[in-house]
Image (cartoon, rainbow, N blue to C red):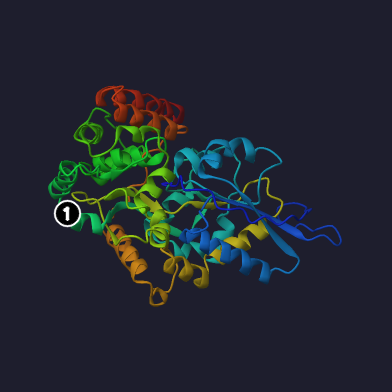
Amino acid sequence: MIRKTGVAALVAVTLALSACGGGGGEPAAEPGQPRVLKLWHYEAAESAMGRAWAEAIKKFEATHPGVKVRFEEKSFEQIQKTASMVLNSDEAPDLMEYNKGNATAGLLSKQGLIADMSEEVTKRGWDKLLPGGLATTARYDDRGVMGSGNWYGLPNYGEFVMVYYNKDLFEKHKVEVPATYEEFTAALDAFVKAGVTPVSLAGAEYPAQQIVYQLALSKADRAWVDAYQSYQGKVDFQGPELTYGATTFADWVKKGYVDEKASGLKAEDMGVAFMKGDFPVMISGSWWYGRVAEEAKGFEWGHFLFPGSTMAPGSSGNLWVVPEKSENKDLAYDFIDITMSKEIQNLLGNSGGVPVAADPAAITDPKSKELIETFNKLTAADGLAFYPDWPAPGYYDVLVAGTQQLINGAKSPAEVLTEIAGPYEDNLADLGN
């Protein structure tokens, strides 16, 4: 999150400690002063990742006497908008969670702001834990394009977009769980007819653009995804895939599947409304799964892959990146290693996350097992199609504005597609494509 992610900021666990270090290898603290690992991430405390990273901090400090972790509260939006500026200053952390893709981690790698960790990846065997497409978002070439080149980050979980549904509301309105897209829209129509807006949505952040992309994916193939994401072919923004996505999404608004007021809502608003039981459906990422399991107490719920599509927005999870200015790179790599350990990976899996290196037999929570099985089904079909905002720097904001215009009817689908094509094509020109 995609993402991923737009979730609420984790409540800070701040340890008021000072530190001093040398270069990136093995810096020494001043006598009597502890070394400090300055860590930023934006996972909510009650999410699967938030729980796992909190436990990783405890394990890190227990295994590193004389070292303390200073966790600083940040949000997805804060890091998304200020990363290049902050990482080029003395305020840079030692380790940071960051969004993956050409427009984000790829851009930072090209700017020389995050460290090449290829040697550590090989030495610690992390590459063996990330087979196939899971490594795609961790490696970038000299243009900042993902999929090849050196390792500039490390993911330790997977994620994908799916349909969350309120079983109680489906049962109350006698709506069957859909297996096809036609059945899905029939279900949405049934809710509208009953006076219920079916889909909880947020247009001011990532959720709306991911739905437009999901609809486009239902008419796309892998070659189209490779062209869009990795510039391996020409993308026609007025072609059948994106035209279908934008036009169908605009039709959803007209049909009352989503509320026009959603154009001003953020992802947190969307998620909280679903977890309160106000909506039958939420189309969003697995990063919500742990929170839904924890907070949606008043009703039964489930999930399914978007009907009518073999692909979905998704990838390996957000990356741990090590800023080039970090004075504690050795500590940062040790912390990453702990998050890849069986103990932390198993905790992640049993908390509603999608681990990449857990012991399958150790995942005992029924809901968590369902989630991991769905992810495995999607990856087995080569169904991870990344996220719509990845291809160009600043594209996230471009797509937010475009989808807001579709929701409020300010522009037609064709006009919006023309508008979002410009920055994409400009980026291609900058890359020499």
Residue 56, compared with residue 39, is above or below; it is below
Does the image show residue 156?
no
Mark 1 falls on what kind of element? loop
Give the residue furthest to the bottom: 361
Residue at 59% across / 37% down in the picture?
84
- Give left or right: position of 369 versus 253: right
- Give left or right: position of 19 versus 158: right
Q: Position of residue 260 (x, y in %)?
A: 30, 32
Q: Position of residue 401 (x, y in %)?
A: 39, 28
Identify which amino acid the numbered label 1 is placed on.
Answer: Pro
Q: Position of residue 312 (x, y in %)?
A: 29, 49
- Give left or right: position of 101 versus 86: left
**Residue bearing mark 1:** 178
Nearest to the observer: residue 58 or residue 177:
177
Residue at 57% across / 66% down in the picture?
55
Residue 242, compared with residue 154, is above or below; it is above
Residue at 41% across / 59% down in the picture?
295
Dot 1 surroundings within 10 Å: few (below 14), some, or many (20 or more)?
A: some
Does the image show residue 330?
yes
